[in-house]
Amino acid sequence: MADIVLNVHPDLSREERVRLEQDLRDYAGVISIHFSEEHPHLLKAVYDPDVTSSADLLVHIGERGVEAMKIG
């Protein structure tokens, strides 16, 4: 397992965050995904590095028109 914290554009609405979480839950290799309650622009993902990568996740998010960057 590997994990990543992403900074997602802060103007994303709650509905857009929920849709993005749901979409990423179905992405191959993603084990867990959720936005921080305290900092709603932070998205934490746990994934299987044998199946996907942080770069793949960033590309997938970008393909949905959402700006994100890896911060940890």
Image: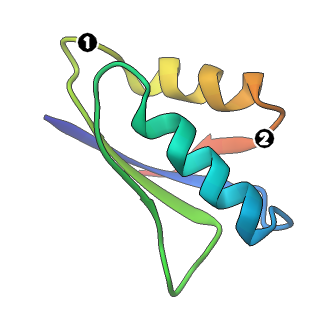
In this rendered view, identify the residue nearer to me: 4 or 45: 45
In the picture provided, is 70 more to the left or to the right than 8? left
User: Looking at the image, which is closer to me, 8 or 21?
Assistant: 21
Please tell me the numbered disc located at residue 51. Answer: 1
Residue at the (63%, 20%) spot, across then down:
59
Snapshot quadrant of residue 14: bottom right
Can you identify the residue that label 2 sits on? 66
Left-right relation of 14 to 65: left
Query: Circle 2: is it few (<14), some (14-19), or many (20+) Cα within 10 Å?
Result: some
Q: Disc 2 and disc 1: Cα gap in Å?
A: 22 Å
What's the image's color scheme? rainbow
Q: Residue furthest left?
A: 1
Query: Do residues under tags 2 and 1 come within 8 Å of each other at their CB atoms?
Result: no
Vertical comparison of 39 with 6: above or below: below
Identify the residue at image location x=55%, y=64%: 42
User: Whole-percent x and y of residue 58?
Assistant: 59, 29
What secondary structure is marked by label 1? loop
- Residue 51: x %, y % from top left: 25, 12
In the image, residue 65 sits, relative to residue 14, either above or below, namely above
Taking the image as shown, residue 31 lies to the left or right of residue 58, namely: left
Query: What residue do we see at 41% from left, 39% from top?
Result: 25
**Residue 30 spot, x, y in % from top left:** 32, 32
| Relative height, residue 8 to residue 24 (above, below) | below
Q: Quadrant of the N terminus?
A: top left
Amino acid type of the residue tagged 2 in the rendering: Val
On screen, residue 4 above or below 13: above
Which badge, 2 or 1, is on the more N-terminal residue? 1
Q: Which of the 4 image quadrants contains residue 11?
A: bottom right
Q: Secondary structure at mark 2?
A: loop
Amino acid, disc 1 = Val
Q: Nearer the viewer, residue 48 or 21?
A: 21
